[in-house]
Image (cartoon, rainbow, N blue to C red):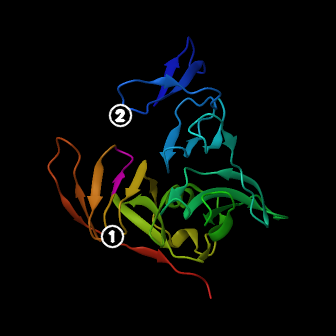
Amino acid sequence: MNIVFSGETMNSWSSFLLLTSDGGKTWKHAADIPQMPEPEMLHVTPGEGWLYSDESNGDQGLYLTRDGARSWREVAPEPTGFEDCEVHGLPTFEDAKHGFLPLRCVPTKAWEFRRTLVLLATSDGGRTWKADRTVANLPQNEISKSQYSSSTVVGSDWIFAAASHDYPVLTKLGPGARVDASAEAPASRPRYHEIRKLSFATSAQGWVIDEYGSLVATRDGGATWTNITPGSNPQISQFRHHFSSRPEQ
């Protein structure tokens, strides 16, 4: 459990991590942890865990412990052919060994500054990573950035969620996919808005929080969505546009 205390100004704060081994009856401080204002946490095993933060103040990045939070090391992989890579979230694990990690990178010797989203894969619990699929040449306009701003990995799919005409829109990339985000003319794109949060339990069942703070759910892979925001009347909205990207041949 991470505890954060606000300081006298917006950019001053302190934090510490508490550990329990008896179901929360007692807690103790974890020593020498990275200082992060609002970290996201993932525990793969009782002794192995990950911390991630994308906050602009304080330490940023991804950290890993394999000894029950006694020590931490930063994880900053840079796949071949890319540079200036930034971790873009916590890893997702199918089991203790097989998982995925999203990055934002710049291709080596790129003629112009256009980010590439890279999904890394591991088969040894995060000790080594290799590029699995990419979204290249991401334009800097808001429409494209919003389309690929929120993502998760479920099963064999890398799923991106955005909003168009107030409905969630999913873009799915399968294993080995190589997508060029600049290939589609901006005039032919819908106007996307960012999704605040995205979570899928299976490829069919998922939830998103949209830009207005509404919680909507799907049980059919995004074909229809139900508003399940507490206090609201549930509505079923037909999903009219489904964008599915396939690997280039």
Instruction: Name the residue rendered at 17%, 41% in the picture.
Output: 231
Q: Residue furthest top?
A: 8
| Residue under label 2 | 23
Percent coordinates x, y for residue 174 in the rendering:
51, 76
| Mark 1: amino acid | Gly
Q: Which residue is nearer to you in this view: 11 or 201?
A: 201
How many marks are shown on the rendered structure? 2
Q: Residue at x 55, y 29 (%)?
A: 37
Magenta span: 207-212
Find out whether the residues at labels 1 and 2 contact each other: C-beta distance under 8 Å. Answer: no
Residue neighbourhood size for the residue with mark 2, other residues' Cα within 10 Å, grouped as few (<14), some (14–19), many (≥20): few
In the foreground, 37 or 180: 37
Magenta span has 221? Answer: no
Write down the residue under mark 1: 221
Where residue 12 appears, x then y in whole percent? 60, 18
The image shows residue 34, relative to residue 61, as above or below, that is above
Looking at the image, the residue that sits furthest to the front is: 22
> Of the residues tagged 1 and 2, which is closer to the observer?
2
Q: Who's the residue at 50% across and 59% down the image?
A: 93
**Residue nearest the observer in this picture, 102 or 56:** 102
